Each structure stands twice: as structure tokens, then as C-alpha cells.
Image (spheres, rainbow, N blue to C red):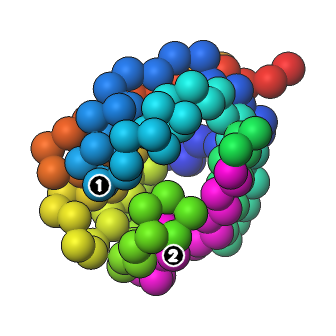
Amino acid sequence: MSKPNYTGTYHMVEQDNMDSYLEALDINFALRKIVCLLKPTKEITHDLATGAMKIRTLTTFKNFNMDFTIGEEFTEDLGAVDGRTCQTTVSWEGDKLVCVQKGEKEGRGWTHWLEGKKLHLEMRVQGIIAKQVFKKAE
């Protein structure tokens, strides 16, 4: 069975439990409040043949870029998020992309999946789960 192509531009339409997730990452109160007000856009480029993926998370406050090949571990610089680095692997679990980030914080990672024109993102750290939903731009 072929894997879904995540390529596209997506605008956030829903968010849940982000403040608790950021607090678990030791993000200070003021920055958490700013981040929770942001409405990020995700620009994803996905090469199905090679597994190469680029995810650009764009906001009016700060942008975050993540380039990787599915199934290959890499050192991820999360300086733009919480000042940490970790060993990261993104793999397929069925039609979902599952990211495991090994570092200072236990149970850190995320899962992306598509449902129609919606891109779902579930972020995890130390048992805390935050969710975002993005709608694909036409």
C-alpha cells in the first residue's frame, strides 16, 4: 500500500492543551502565552520516492524548519523551541508519521496524519499531549 503524500500548505484551525505541553518543556509563562495565540502555517514538501521531507512551521513570531529523511535518525536542533537538541527519528506507522525525540525530556515526540484536507498533529512530552489541526490551503 502506498504512503500518503503530505506535500502542501496547511493553516491551523484548532489547538488543544498547548499551554500544558509548553510548560512541560519548561517554556516560561510569557512565551507560552504568546505561542498559544499564534496561528501557524505549515509548508510541507514530501518526496515519496526518497522519503525526504521538509516541514516549515511559519508564524508571525518565529519560524521553525525541520528537514529529514523518513526512517533515518538525525540530530535535531530545537533551539527555536526550547533550546535543546535531541536524537530524532521519524518513521511510518501505517499512514501516520511518528516522530521520536530522544533527549532530556522523556516521552517526547509527535504524530502527523491526514484526514481528507486536514492535517492532524499530536505532540507529546512527559505524558502531556497537545493537539493541533490544520486545513490544507486550496
Secondary structure found at label 1: loop
Task: Find residue 70 and report its horizontal and vertical position in percent.
Answer: 51, 67
Residue name at image x 70 percent, y 44 percent: 61
The residue singled out by tag 2 in the image is: 77
State the quadrant of the C terminus: top right
Give the vertical position of 132 relative to 72 (above or below). above
Q: CA distance from mark 2 to mark 1?
A: 16 Å
Give the vertical position of 108 relative to 57 (above or below). below
Task: Find residue 21 and report its horizontal and vertical position in percent.
Answer: 30, 40
> Which range of residues does the magenta coloring cover?
62-78
User: Which mark, residue 108?
Assistant: none
Give the vertical position of 129 relative to 45 (above or below). above
Task: Find residue 127 and report its horizontal and vertical position in percent.
Answer: 14, 44
Residue name at image x 45 percent, y 40 percent: 30
Residue name at image x 60 percent, y 17 percent: 13
Q: Badge 1: how crowded within 10 Å, few (<14), some, or many (20+)?
A: few
Whether 69 is among the magenta residues is: yes
Of 100 and 80, nearer the camera is: 80
Q: Is 26 on the left or on the right of 55, as rendered? A: left
Q: Badge 2: how crowded within 10 Å, few (<14), some, or many (20+)?
A: some
The residue singled out by tag 1 in the image is: 26
The reply to whether residue 115 is visible in this rendering is: no
Secondary structure found at label 2: strand
Whether 132 is among the magenta residues is: no
Query: Mostly what secondary structure, the magenta segment?
Result: strand
Q: Which quadrant of the structure image shows residue 23?
A: top left
Number of numbered discs on residues:
2
Task: Find residue 134 and report its horizontal and vertical position in percent.
Answer: 60, 25
Amino acid tagged 2: Asp
Q: Is 59 on the left or on the right of 83, as rendered? A: right
